């Protein structure tokens, strides 16, 4: 059944907001295809941007695509449209992750639309935060954001936070001994600033943050031993605020949903004046991932470790032009 097509400039604007989402090593592993006849935007995984050694099951890839899908929903709602989403609509196509059918006008005061102003303000911050707790009311809002997307956000107690920090250090040691994983990190991260490399993907040097001094911290050091003249050292918070994002199941559908939940949490955190960074290092090793889960929680599968707090907002990472990720049919 044909539908009245939307102006292509509207579609480009929606996708421009969608691709502001975070992804593993900022690989931006997504492709969007808009079909005029049906007014449907298809979201596809881009296998050429997979990280087979770091992310062998494509769990992180699908989470990144899920985060982009959530941004697309937010942008559509802010434009007064209703996005109706069908996840994994074609069992014969593993790369087609979602179909988003656009129609009509969205309801006034849509909760998704309220998050739209924060899409361009959300950046991963790998800088030190202040050593202070997050208010309970803020934690509750973040947990509710995850629940709205079918996931769970759990704030572990200080004992388990120390355990997570130990597991991150174990994962760093494992990565240091794996040349394939190290090579992928080097491929997608650049010690030079973005105005020197002019790259449209990956993580530029200014987004690395300072080299940590002293205590362990849940911030990935993308330099992996490479020299970076002029890079500062800094002491990070001694008692970081850590949240674990998880799902009941651990299948591709759950990874896409976890990505949507992650982005909803991050946008809500930005709206609440918090900065955030993520680390998937201990989740990238099967012999370590199981231990990240807090034994007193009901969370079955941890999908992301999130560090939250009050501090610098972080530097933006580059984005591919919309023309490179959007096909209009």
Image: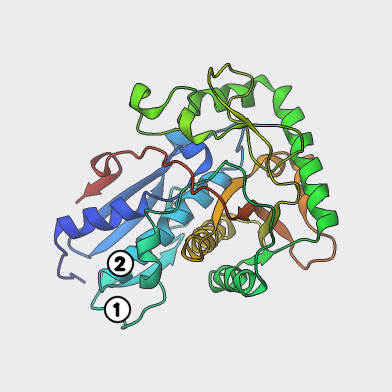
- Front residue of 261/217: it is 217
Q: From the viewer's perspective, is residue 317 above or below residue 269? A: above
* Residue at figure coordinates x 56%, y 45% from the top left: 60
For the point 59% across and 60% down, which residue is it?
254
Would you place residue 58 above or below residue 76 in this image? above
- The reply to whether the C-beta atoms of the residues labelled 2 and 1 are less than 8 Å apart is yes
**Residue 134 falls left or right of residue 321:** right
Q: Is 254 rendered above or below residue 140?
A: above
Position of residue 148 measured from the top left corner of the image (x, y, whole percent): 54, 73
Where's residue 215, x and y in %?
Answer: 77, 38
Residue 84 or residue 304, whichever sits in front = 304
Which residue sits furthest bottom?
Answer: 108
In the rendering, which numbered label is found on residue 76? 2
Q: Secondary structure at mark 2?
A: helix
Residue that mark 1 sits on: 106
Residue 43 percent location from the top left of the image: 37, 53
Q: Residue at x 53, y 45 (%)?
A: 125
Q: Quadrant of residue 224?
A: top right
Classify 274 as above or below 95. Answer: below
Indicate the quadrant containing the N terminus: top left, top right, bottom left or bottom right: bottom left
Residue 99 visible within the image: no
Q: Residue at x 43, y 61 (%)?
A: 70
Circle nearer the N terminus (2, 1): 2
Q: CA distance from mark 2 to mark 1?
A: 8 Å
At label 2, counting other C-alpha atoms closer than 10 Å, the crowd grade (few under 14, some 14-19, many 20 or more) is: many
Taking the image as shown, residue 158 lies to the left or right of residue 71, namely right
Is 96 situated left or right of 226 in this image? left
């Amino acid at each position: 059944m044909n539908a009245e097509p939307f102006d292509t400039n509207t579609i480009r604007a929606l996708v421009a907001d969608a691709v502001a989402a975070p992804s593993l090593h900022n690989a931006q592993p997504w492709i969007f295809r808009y079909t005029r006849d049906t007014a449907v935007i298809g979201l596809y995984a881009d296998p050429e941007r997979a990280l087979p050694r770091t992310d062998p099951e494509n769990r992180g890839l699908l989470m990144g695509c899920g985060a982009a899908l959530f941004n697309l929903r937010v942008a559509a709602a802010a434009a007064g449209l209703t996005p109706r989403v069908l996840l994994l609509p074609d069992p014969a196509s593993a790369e087609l992750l979602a179909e988003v059918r656009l129609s009509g006008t969205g309801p006034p005061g849509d909760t998704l639309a309220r998050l739209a102003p924060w899409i361009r303000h959300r950046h991963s911050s790998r800088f030190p935060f202040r050593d202070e707790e997050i208010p309970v009311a803020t934690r509750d809002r973040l947990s509710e954001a995850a629940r709205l997307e079918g996931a769970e956000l759990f704030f572990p107690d200080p004992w388990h936070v120390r355990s997570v920090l130990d597991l991150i250090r174990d994962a760093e040691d494992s990565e240091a001994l794996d040349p394939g994983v190290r090579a992928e990190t080097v491929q997608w991260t650049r010690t030079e600033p973005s105005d020197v490399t002019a790259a449209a993907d990956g993580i530029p040097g200014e987004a690395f943050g300072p080299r940590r001094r002293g205590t362990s911290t849940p911030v990935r050091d993308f330099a992996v031993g490479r020299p970076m003249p002029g890079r500062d050292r800094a002491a990070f918070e001694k008692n970081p605020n850590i949240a674990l994002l998880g799902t009941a199941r651990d299948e591709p559908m759950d990874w896409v949903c976890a990505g949507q939940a992650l982005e909803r949490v991050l946008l809500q955190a930005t709206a609440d004046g918090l900065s955030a960074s993520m680390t998937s290092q201990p989740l990238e090793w099967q012999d370590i991932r199981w231990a990240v889960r807090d034994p007193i929680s009901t969370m079955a599968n941890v999908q992301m470790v999130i560090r939250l707090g009050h501090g610098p907002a972080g530097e933006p990472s580059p984005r591919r032009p919309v023309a490179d990720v959007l096909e209009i049919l």
